[in-house]
Amino acid sequence: MKKQTILMQKLMAVCLLSAGLILGGCGSDDGGGGGFPLPSSSSSENSSASTSSTSSAVVEEGGRATVHDFLMPEAPGQEVLGNETISLDISNTSEGYLTLTYTGGADKVQVQITYPDGTMYPYPLNLGAPRVFPLTGGSGSYKVDVLEHVSDNMYSLGYSDNISVSINDEFRPFLYPNQYVDYTASSSTTTLGVQLSDKSADDLGYVTNVYNYVIDNVTYDEELAANIGTNYIPDPASTLASKKGICFDYASLMSALLRSQGVPTKLVVGYSGTAYHAWISVYLDEIGWVDNIIQFDGSTWSLMDPTLAANKANSSSAIKEYVGDGSNYTVKYNY
């Protein structure tokens, strides 16, 4: 109990960050990971967010056991479903993921995975390589449909199957990269994770350092937000290189940094008020799933929303008032 109290005190001390309020969220729900338009903050205010080095923001304590043996998905081909153009490797569903490879001629492909609770998760398939899809609904029966683009908004069913999944560890789906949280053992995000971990005392310190780095170095990309189409897929390495992104990019980058260092992280997509939005939640051994980590006032938490905190235009009191008890946020998908 004393250890948890100390952790909460540390959270209160290090997470009272300069945060801003982006009431506009990231967009409208198009049912397929779609558009994420402009937030409501003004251009001049939002663009003033710092993109300089964050050495002063990173807490350099050291002592955390940095991960170097990264958890990476595999497609060993031991159990494969599909047809001539669609290969669904379900060899590692017990680890909380499956891989899908498409070699057909369609210019666009949609994957629909129906979870045990009946929720259908729509994915645009990023063509060109095997892609990893998480099974975050736990053990049970999943249905996988692969739809091939025909013309206009018309798709034909290229493959469909049901799979029975028994997951060994509830945290595994939130520890691997996938199509929306993409990284490799040698990617720039993984390298940065090692660097930030080496400066962290423990998991909580690492989460804080990652959070500070992302909100101090990545600014909201208003041009992308204003022109984005449907089926957007974030790329953490590109976000890190450009230092710009929308809410999906913020959440994806932070998820990649945390997962690569063994911190279970959910990339959450849902609604902030009435706006389609993305944020994250993390798991800490001493506390459990922490959906609310921007601020702690002694009894309640506020959601960890890097997009909000990265906007420097508004005060931390504004974000605290909006986030409140989390009732302004509604979860739709966990990736």
Image (tube, grey):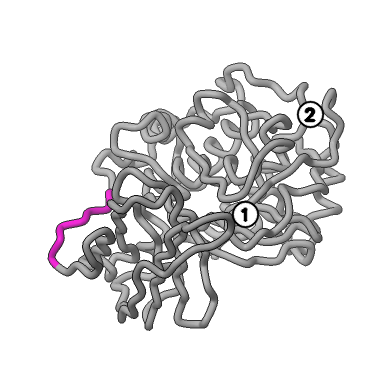
Question: In the image, is 85 to the left or to the right of 137?
Answer: left
Stretch of the chain drawn in magenta: 72-78
Please name the amino acid that badge 1 sits on. Met
Badge nearest the viewer, 1 or 2: 2
Q: Position of residue 216 (x, y in %)?
A: 64, 28
Q: Which mark is residue 46?
A: 2
Q: Amino acid at mark 2?
A: Asn
Viewer-side residue, 299 vs 118: 118
- For disc 1, the neighbor class at 10 Å (few under 14, some 14 to 19, many from 20) is many
Q: Answer whether residue 74 is magenta in the image.
A: yes
Which residue is under mark 1? 8
- Callout 2: 10 Å neighbours few (<14), some, many (20+)? many
Q: Up-down: is 312 above or below 265? A: above
Are dots 1 and 2 in contact, CB under 8 Å? no
Residue 309 falls left or right of residue 110: right
Residue 49 within the magenta-colored segment of the rendering: no
Q: CA distance from mark 1 to mark 2?
A: 30 Å
Residue drawn at x 26%, y 58% as measured from the top left = 85
- Tell me the residue at 77%/64% (across/down): 325
